[in-house]
Amino acid sequence: MASVLSRRLGKRSLLGARVSTPSSLADRMLGTAQIPTLQAELSRVSSHLASYEGGRCTEQAEESSTNPSFPNLNRLQLHPGQRVYVTYNGQECTGLVEQHNQLSDEVKVLLLEQGLHTCWKTEDVRLAQMQRSPHPTLPMDHSPATAMDHSPANGSVQRSVSRNIDVPKRKSDAAVEMDEMMAAMVLTSLSCSPVVQSPPSRESSMPASQAACDSWKESGDVSDSGSSTTSGHWSGGSDISTPSPPHTEASPKYSSEALSSPQADDGFETDSDPFLLDEPAPRKRKNSVKVMYKCLWPNCGKVLRSIVGIKRHIKTQHLGDGADSDQRRREEDFYYTEVQVKEEAAPESATSPTFGSSPIVIQQALAKPEALALDQATLESHLPNSALSQSAPSSFWHIQADHAYQALPSIQIPVSPHIFTSISWAAATSTIPSLSPVRSRSLSFSEHQQPTSMLKSHLIVASPPRAPSGTRKVRGEAKKCRKVYGIEHRDQWCTACRWKKACQRFLD
DNA sequence: GTTGCCGGGTT
DNA sequence: AACCCGGCAAC
């Protein structure tokens, strides 16, 4: 979903790039361009950054005050010791407020890096809270495009207008990371809310979440063919703007079908909700299960407590720290998995029925470090309607085949960086080639809410891998879309059937 | 003849 | 990648 955001930002960042100033400055401006935007969105679900928000709001208020052309800190009382930024010798420097004379509008600042005591006009001082704000004393952002994004400002106002303009600039790595984290938080949280899930409400939700909805719809649409997840992050390198975030039931195509299984939304909510709460600090499960994140990189197996940590580990240790490699940045999502570790050593079978108790993550862990719990909220296939849920296994087969690089038997399929469907399968040490192990699959999340007839999919012993080339797939016994819906209702067929491909809805 | 779907073409 | 369809094989 973060990449969803980056899609949105990506388009707009062209604008930002055009209007931005020297690169170093542009980088510094990111914070203002990006974070406040997110901030405003985040403010609905989080208040821990309120101080920053407050700082910005204060500044905004001043812009409309008596001196609109210079957003300044006139009305702010700077306190001694307060951290501020100033531009000294063309460089942005951090300093501490020594004294603020509001009458003379001067601020004495101790420059930390230079060790100098300096005196500044208040307007030349930026609050550390707004640390990444563009420098007001440098000419910048005079592009008409920028001004047009807001009100048609005259020349003298442009500078102030651009300060808080909601036009993202080219991102620094830190900003990207921040964006992704925050966007992830926002989207995961909002994705649980009825607002996002309800198609009519999409318009009113924030842009990022709407983008998420769109993308989810995409993934939902392709889920019929069982390849939805292949449009996910690992292919994002070629086009990061086509991610495959979690799927909300927003597709009109499925909306009618979804009526037949109204539990779908509930299931989704149950599923993703813990992630919302768990994201910053995974909530402990009732049965004192710790959620850890295990590196899946071959011969690594490092286990960390936080997603951020494991991502950083993967990025730095395995993927390298390519500064501008978006693909790599996203790849890190594929190399870790969420692991439940019970604190009391009570080894539990991977197929123990406990998976019903926790909708999110699955079982296992313990006995072997390789025992991994996988999760993914690929609700796109399962939740919207019961029929589609049958197509899920084939999706996973594709995943398995497409990601042989996953050295371990478990695979984590990120649909979004932070929402996963739980799958666990056992790779047989058999004669079967590694790409087609005998797999048993258990879906943990919310399938118990599916109609009873669907329960069989809880544990599916895989049919033998499709026979090697040459032999045609044996015609299955299951009724296919054509039979079920009839030729006259071809529009209700699954996509594959419409394309005269192997039916993905009524699998054999 | 009907149906399922593979393989390949088109967009 | 999404979509379409000729053609084959199973029914």
Image (tube, coloured by chain):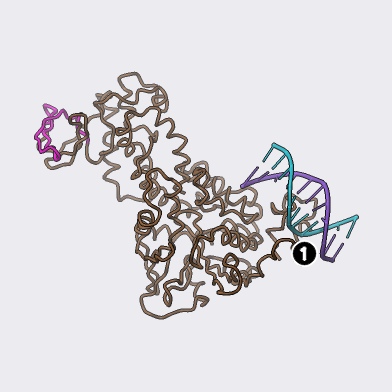
Chain colours: A brown, B cyan, C purple
- What is the residue that sits farthest to the top in this orientation? A155
Q: Is residue A125 magenta?
A: yes
Find residue A334 and report its horizontal and vertical position in percent.
46, 57
Find residue C6 and report its horizontal and vertical position in percent.
82, 47
Residue occupying the point 59% across, 68% down: A433
Quarter-of-image position of residue A446:
bottom right
Find residue A287 and report its horizontal and vertical position in percent.
40, 74
Q: Is residue A218 left or right of residue A94?
A: right
Find residue A407 and report its horizontal and vertical position in percent.
49, 64
- Tell me the residue that label 1 is attached to: A475
Q: Is residue A132 left or right of residue A243?
A: left
Q: Is residue A205 left or right of residue A137?
A: right
Residue occupying the point 43% across, 50% down: A328
Q: Residues within 10 Å of mark 1 (few under 14, many from 20)?
A: few
Quarter-of-image position of residue A113:
top left
Q: Is residue A462 magenta?
A: no
Q: Is residue A49 visible to the viewer in this orientation of the structure?
A: yes
Amino acid, disc 1: Arg
Vertical comparison of A438 with A484: above or below: below
Vertical comparison of A86 with A340: above or below: above
- Subunit ID for the residue under disc 1: A
Query: Which residues, given as a range, are shown in magenta?
Result: A101-126
Residue occupying the point 22% across, 40% down: A128
Secondary structure category for the residue under label 1: loop
| Of the pair A194 and A242, the residue shown nearer to us | A242
Vertical comparison of A321 with A105: above or below: below
Q: Quadrant of the C terminus of chain A?
A: bottom right
Q: Is residue A498 visible to the viewer in this orientation of the structure?
A: no
| Of the pair A130 and A132, the residue shown nearer to us | A132
